[in-house]
């Protein structure tokens, strides 16, 4: 639109790269946006893009939802922000935690929970507390989140993600187990709006959280 109004190209680039700064032309086209490079190149473009993100605390979360499964684009934006902070001699505060998740199976289907906000599906699980083993955390989190007592099975795999939360960069490591419900009664925690038992073929059709997508791949093995 700015180009149609004969706005100088430099100004148009600022607008383009601040909106979703970090997308390649191919990534932008796949999202239904103009297939142009939206990666800031000059120092000025990088600073404008960075300022846009820090002035709106929720923008990074919206970008992650908008980009869907394209975690590469999201991580590219985080890298840009670290680069700009480095120019000023500072950096985003970083935190790291370890989480245990369980793919609870019953009659060939797997339990997934729908978060209230954002509206994404995930497997039961959560942070490993001080002194807990991953298996202990997996059992505790299942009972807390869905009311089920679970027999934790084999290790399916591990995965990780870097994302912004509360103005900090968080690195989360996920340890994923198989599991069987052996007691309790299915109920929802305050974090979740719904629960479903879903077959392997149906799982990829759900709007899965970024930490749940690798679990679907683990289950194919």
Image (cartoon, rainbow, N blue to C red):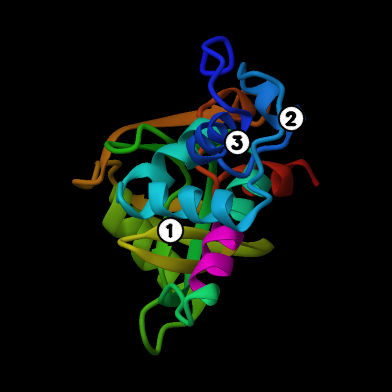
Residue identified by numbered label 1: 164
How far apart are the alpha carbons under marks 1 and 3? 29 Å
Residue 25: mark in rendering: 2
Estimate the x, y position of residue 151 in percent, counting from the top left: 49, 61
Answer left or right for 120 relative to 189. Answer: right
Q: Does residue 134 sit above or below 174 in this rendering?
A: below
Give me the residue at 28% from left, 51% from top. Answer: 147
Residue identified by numbered label 3: 10
Label 2–label 1 contact, CB within 8 A = no
Answer left or right for 210 relative to 35. Answer: left
Give me the residue at 58% from left, 68% from top. Answer: 83
Give me the residue at 40% from left, 53% from top. Answer: 51
Task: Give the residues drawn in magenta, as a range.
Answer: 78-85
Q: In this rendering, which labeled residue sits more in front, label 1 or label 3?
A: 3
How far apart are the alpha carbons under marks 2 and 3? 18 Å
Mark 2 or mark 1: which comes first in sequence?
Answer: 2
């Amino acid at each position: 639109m700015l180009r149609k109004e004969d706005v100088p190209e430099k100004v148009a680039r600022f607008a383009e790269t601040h909106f979703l700064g970090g997308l390649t032309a191919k990534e932008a086209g796949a999202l239904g946006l103009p297939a142009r490079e939206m990666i800031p190149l000059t120092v000025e473009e990088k600073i404008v893009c960075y300022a846009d993100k820090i002035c709106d605390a929720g923008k990074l979360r919206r970008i992650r939802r908008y980009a869907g499964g394209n975690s590469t684009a999201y991580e590219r934006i985080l890298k840009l922000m670290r680069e700009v902070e480095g120019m000023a001699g500072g950096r985003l505060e970083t935190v790291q935690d370890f989480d245990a998740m369980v793919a609870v199976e019953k009659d060939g289907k797997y339990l997934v929970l729908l978060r209230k906000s954002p509206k994404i599906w995930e497997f039961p699980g959560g942070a490993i507390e001080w002194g807990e083993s991953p298996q202990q955390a997996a059992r505790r989190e299942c009972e807390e989140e869905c009311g089920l007592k679970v027999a934790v099975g084999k290790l399916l795999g591990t995965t990780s993600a870097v994302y912004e939360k509360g103005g900090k960069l968080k690195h989360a490591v996920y340890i994923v187990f198989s599991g069987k419900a052996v007691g309790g009664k299915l109920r929802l925690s305050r974090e979740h709006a719904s629960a479903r038992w879903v077959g392997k073929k149906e799982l990829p059709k759900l709007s899965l959280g970024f930490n749940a997508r690798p679990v679907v791949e683990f289950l194919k093995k």
